Image: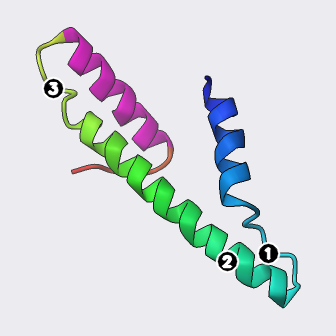
Amino acid sequence: MDGMEIYKVVKKLVGPIYPVGVTERDDIYFENLKVMTDLVDKLITDICDVETVKAKPEFSRKRAGEFAAKFLDKIGIVNE
């Protein structure tokens, strides 16, 4: 399963998050937004954990850590 397939599954599981201006719907969408942001927070935390191994001497750990660091830099997150 690739990233786009996982994205579609998550979107379907969580439901809409974009407010449309109808209070009854937007209340549900807001709850969905809270679920989605909680998930993203957990995923970014996992990626930050991987970034911490970028200075390790083992090739596979260094590669993963550097990849994670580049992603975090791309989205403007500094992991210290």
Q: Quadrant of the N terminus?
A: top right
Task: State yes or no: discs 3 and 1 in contact (Cβ < 8 Å).
Answer: no
Q: Residues within 10 Å of mark 2 (few under 14, many from 20)?
A: some
Name the residue that disc number 1 marks.
19
Nearer the N terminus, badge 2 or badge 3? 2
Residue range highlighted in magenta: 59-74
Q: Residues within 10 Å of mark 1 (few under 14, many from 20)?
A: some
Give the answer, above or below, for where 37 lies relative to 7: below
Give the answer, above or below, for where 19 lies relative to 70: below
Q: Residue furthest front?
A: 13
Mark 2–mark 1 Cα distance, whole angstroms, equals: 8 Å
Magenta stretch holds residue 65: yes
- Which quadrant would residue 70 be assigned to in this image? top left
Residue 52 place in picture, x, y as percent: 20, 37
Magenta stretch holds residue 32: no
Nearer the N terminus, badge 3 or badge 1? 1
Nearer the N terminus, badge 2 or badge 1? 1
Residue at figure coordinates x 78%, y 81% from the top left: 26
Give the answer, above or below, for where 68 lies relative to 33: above
Q: Residue furthest bottom?
A: 23
Is residue 72 visible to the viewer in this orientation of the structure?
A: yes
Which of the pair 61/34 is nearer the observer? 34
- Look at discs 3 and 1 and give the one toward the viewer: 1
Which of the pair 33/56 is nearer the observer? 33
Name the residue that disc number 2 marks.
30
Q: Residue furthest top?
A: 59
Give the answer, above or below, for where 18 lies relative to 28: above
